[in-house]
Each structure stands twice: as structure tokens, then as C-alpha cells.
Amino acid sequence: MLSSQKIEEKQKITFKDILLKIKKAITNETFLYVMKRIFSSLLTLFLIIALLIVLLRIIPDILLYDPNLYNKLKASSYSSAEAYRNSELFRYGRTTLEGRRLPALFSVVQYIYWLLPIPKKIPVRWNVNYTEVLRYWEGTVYFGRSLTQPSKYITDMIGERMGISMRISLITVFFIYIISYPLGIVMAKKPGGVADRLGTAFIVLNYAIPGLVFYLLMNSFMGKPDGVFGWLKAGYLYQEGQPQTLIPPIFCMVFLSIPGNSMWVRRFTVDELNSDYVKFARSKGLSDNRIMYTHVLRNSIVPLVRSIPSTLLFSFVGSYYVEKIWSIPGTGGLLTGALQKNDFPLIQGLTFIYAAISMLAFLLGDIITVFFDPRIRLRAK
Amino acid sequence: MRNLDKFNVDNLPGFDGGEAVLPKLPKQEELFTLVGEDKSLESEKITTAPYSYFKSVFKVFFRNPGAIIGIVVLALLIIGAIVFPIFAPEGYLEMNVRRVHRLPDAIHILGCDLEGKDLFYSIWAGLRKSLTLAVVSAGINVILGTIAGLIWGFFRKLDVFFIGLYNLISNIPSLLIYMLLATILRATFPEMLDEVRLVISLTFTGWIGLALFVRNQTLIILNREYNLASHTLGTPARRIMTKNLLPYLLAVIVTQGSLMIPGMISSEVGLSFFGLGLHISKISLGGLIENGRKYFTQYFHAFIWPSVALALIILAFFLIGFSLSDSLDPRKHR
């Protein structure tokens, strides 16, 4: 008897509970804030796409097809020359197959339709005369197809290149954090002391080194088979399956990124050390180390935690200089290559992905800081 | 404004529904006696020097050895960049097939580069060009950023618009903007000078970072009492911005500007690397480094000397900027 009553009660409560929970979740201020941020991010993304497409439209037609070939064709027959130009402009999404010009707004709407997560079927390959569709793309979110490597989808291009870039970035980030945090803390312990002065000198000198120059010098210096670092067998170029060839690029990136990070760690730690609670703890007789490691570090790391999601999410983008100099087949050169070759779909796709990830990373960074610091609250106005 | 609510008359003790109940106090003369000033006493004299903000800033700035090194290096580089190209022997700054990649000797102290230009004089000429471009771009960025930041911080209703703009610009890779702008400007204005194109590329979106910085600083100062007083007295917005806010912000803006210049010089070098720099006939640091980079394993001198010049100029600006930001902090004025 009793047990069945209990179950009945429980069932009643659960139903109401769910309603209440949903209501609570919707009115939860953090949830509202996150929803607002996501909404404004989507709006910004839309604006970025529109702006980019308009900017790409300003590039005159003559850069998009070969004018010499056009003139040659024109000498023999006008219609074939027009057909050639039309097919080129059609590939760039400026005209229809019949040669009618499309407004930029149409391209914006079309691109957004491609990106919407609904199942769709898009023609991707025609026969030579563009009279018949040979192949369709089927799926949900479509980023377009590269113009310079026509058989490849943009997602595939990024997918096959991001592995190596990601591996390098994650190792680099690991070393940067491991070196720069302790360095910053050691410098902050005694502002104006020997460690602080040496560290500041190192940071300032390091800032002055131009990245490109440093990479080139290190490439020839560390790669020399009979040089000081010859025992590394690093070589001048990256080779697949030989992880020691990655040592010079990773060393360079870590070396050049230490100053920025450790300077911020030092600054936040010094700020915390000057605050009242530290003076209070000291007056109560706590040891300097105890104050540092149980109180100050936790607070000084809060502003730095914000950047962790963006570092992790952007790890798939490689450094352009490094990947070019060591000839690493990563994602670093994709955007510049696309810009130099006027590969519009690749430019659009990459910009969209970078922008979306950077906004997501900022939002995640804000959410993570709330977990690290209960004083901070996210709330929609 | 919100802080004033605390001092609402109704909340003060002793006010009970409009009727004041004050305790009776004895007359002042009964409690205190006038002592007068005794100038002979040592404790009456102020022995420390009077505090002046800018005097202290200069004192701290010039006490820093880094700042002195920075200023000396920068002064030498600027004087050299002005003087040496004037006295360059004829033909030394022009292409010459017979001098291509000539090694350093008595006539050409630093040798010659890929195009046969004398490196010693080219570096000074390139330094002058790069420095001018960087100072002009940084100046435009600082002016635009300051104006936008003041407006952004002062008129809170524009916050939504500016934050949207900031999100828009900061989420597009800057290299994309540089390269797209370069392509568009080259195609639509073929007559445009390379220098103008470079400055437009560098200033098109470069000001937004400084604008955000100025906006944050403005928000902090705007809540101070003297601004509240100005606001209550009905001072027009332009006057508050130029007379109340700008003098206060000037020091921080100068620091940001001096830290921005090395970034602009590096950007010029980077753009030359991507083939978006100045035309080959014009000498700039970026062009020299790019020329040296192509054969740097065989002809090391053509690569390292322009790089050293670049490193020196960046170092000088960073030293000055860091020392300036250090000395502007009143906590260090002791």
C-alpha cells in the first residue's frame, strides 16, 4: 500500500518537476546570456558572410578569366569567347549558366542556404558544355568546392591537412604553458629582483626578433647535419614519419611565444600580490609560498583561463611561415594560397569557419571563467 | 550617479518622517581652543618635495636605463635615415647588374643585394621609408581609434553598434583584409601610389583595437566626480571629451601609439613577404629582407643586415613604449 502510494506521488512530482525544471532553465540568467550571445554571434556571422561576398564582388571580372584566351577565341568566333567567359564567371558564382548576371544578394542568400543544416542536393559537376549535371552533392551543411583543385570539397581539404597542424600546435601550446607560467611567477615573486630583471630583458629582446628572420636562421642553423645540432638529425625540411624533423619548428614557435605569455602571467600575479587579502594573509603570518600557491595563483590564473578554449580550438590552423619554411603540409597556407589564386569558395569557407570558431571560443572562454571564479556572473541585460 | 542613492536624505539617521531630531550640542568654543600656527616646530614643515604627476613620470622614465638606450638608438637610427641617403654616391641606390650579390669590401661596407644596390645606403633609405610609413599608419590609427573610442565610450547608446562592428572586424583574419584590399585597390585604382595603398590597408581596420582600449579607459574616467559635475552643469559633449577626457587619456594613447609603430613596421615586412609590399623600384626594409631571403643561404650578408636594422628599430620602440607605460603608473612614483 505504502509503496504504491509513494510511486504515485513520485510520478506526480516528476511531471511537475520537469515543467519546473524547463521553466527554471529558460529563466536561468546564464542560459539566457548564452542564448543571447549565440544569437548575436549568428547575426555577426551573417554580416561577415555578406561583407566578404560584397568585397569579393568588387574584384573586377577581368581578373577571374584569362583575357588572352578570351581575345584569341574572340578572333575565331564571338559566341565561343562569350561561352568561355560565361563558364568562368559561372564558376565564380557571378552569372547564371545562360549568362545573366546575379546580384551579390543572391550569392549571400545562396551561401546561407548551403550552410543551413537541412538535407539538400547540390549539382557539383557538369559536362563540358554545361548542359547536363553529372554529379550531385548530398548532405546537410555544404561549404562549397575549391576552384583551383576542383575535385576537392573544402571540408576535405581542411580535414586532410589539419592533422599535422593540430599535432604541432598542441605540442607547442603544451611547452609554452609549461615554460611561460613558471617563468612569469618566478618574475612576479620579487618585482625588481634579479630574476625579474633578467626575465624582462629576455622578454624585450625576444620581442624585437622578427619571426620570419628567426625561423629562417633556425632552419639553417638547427638543420645543418654537421652543425651544433647535427645530432638531432632534424634536417632542413619536415619528413613524414620522422618526428625529430619537427623539433626545430616547435622550438622556434615556443621560443617566440614565451615572452607574451609570461609577461601577462607576471602582470596578473603582481596585481594580485598587491591586493588587500594578500596583505591580510601576510599579517596573519602565512608563509610567502603558502600565499602564492594557495591564494594568489588561483586568482591570477582566472584572466588567463579565458584564452584556453581559443588556443585549443584554433590549434588546427598552422603557422603560415613555419609551414612554408619547413614545407609542412598543414592548413597554414590554405588562406593565403586561396587569396593569391582567387579561390573564392575556399576564401569564404575558411573565413566562415575561422569566424565561427573564434566566436565559439570566446563564448566558451567566458563560460569557463565562471567555473574558475565564482565572483563572475554571466547575465543578459 | 547610482552611488548618490546611498546618501538619500530619507536614509540618514535622525530623519524621522521629515522631522529632524538632532541632539543638542554644546557651543564650539566650549569644546575646543584655538592653538594657532607654530612655525618654529620641525613637524609643521613639509620636507618632501611637492608631488607633480608629469614630473614624476619623467623622473621614473629617465631613471630607467632601458628608456635611455631606446631613445639613443632611435635617435641615431632616425638621424642616420635622414642623413645617409642624402650623401649616397650616385647610382648606389639603383639596380646594377655588375654589383649583384657583391660581398662586403672596402667600397661597399655591407656588400650589395640581389639587385646590385649598395646595402649600407639601401638600409638607411629603406629604414626612412618603412619608418615614415609606420609612423603615418600608426598616427592615422591612433587618431581614428581615439575619436571612435571617445564617441563609443561617451554615448552609451552607440555601444550596440560599436560592439557589433568590433565583433565583425576582429573575427575576420587581418591578412584576408590586407590581401583583399590590396587586390581591390590595385584593380580599381591602378594609378594609386604603393605607399598610399599600403597605408590604407594598414589603417582600414587597424584602429578598432585602440578604439576598444580608449572606450574602456573612457568608461573608467567618466564615472569620476569632475565629469559628473561637468555633466550636471550642462557642458556639451564635445567639450567634455576634449577638455576633460582627452588630457587624461593622452599619456596612455601615446604609449599605445609607440607600441603600435613596431607592429606596423613588421606588418610592412610581412606584406612584402606575401608580395603586397612596395614596388621593386622603391626601397623599404620589407623589400630588402624579402630580396635577401631568396638566396640567404648563399649570400648571408644581404639577409642579415636589413634584419638587424629591423630588430634594432623594433627594440628601440619597444624599450621606449614599455618604459613609458611603466612610468605612467603612479604606484611606481616614489
Image: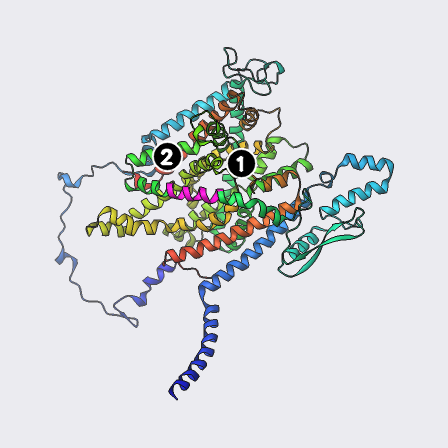
User: What SS does tag 1 mark?
Assistant: loop
| Residue A3 picture quarter | bottom left
| Residues in magenta, as a range | A168-179
Residue A6 position in % (x across, y down): 40, 84
Instruction: List the residue tagged with mark 1.
Output: A239
| Chain of the residue where label 1 is placed in the rendered structure | A
| Residue A257 picture quarter | top left
Please name the residue shown 49% across and 32% down the image: A215
In the image: residue B81, left or right of residue A47: left
Residue B144 position in % (x across, y down): 52, 42
Secondary structure character of the magenta stretch overall: helix
In this view, the residue in front, B139 or A360, is A360
Q: Is residue B236 among what the camera can see?
A: no
Q: Amino acid at mark 1?
A: Gln
Please name the residue shown 54% across and 48% down the image: B171
In the image: residue A211, left or right of residue A265: right
Please name the residue shown 42% across and 37% down the image: B255
Q: Amino acid at mark 2?
A: Ser
Residue A212 position in % (x across, y down): 51, 32
Q: CA distance from mark 2 to mark 1?
A: 44 Å
Please identify the quadrant where the N terminus of chain A is shown.
Answer: bottom left
What kind of colouring is applied to the model shown?
Answer: rainbow
- In the image, is residue B291 above or below residue A152? above
**Residue most extreme to the bottom:** A1
Residue B153 position in % (x across, y down): 47, 50
Q: How many marks?
A: 2
Q: Are marks 2 and 1 in contact (CB under 8 Å)?
A: no
In this view, the residue in front, B62 or B154, is B62
Instruction: List the residue tagged with mark 2.
Output: B323
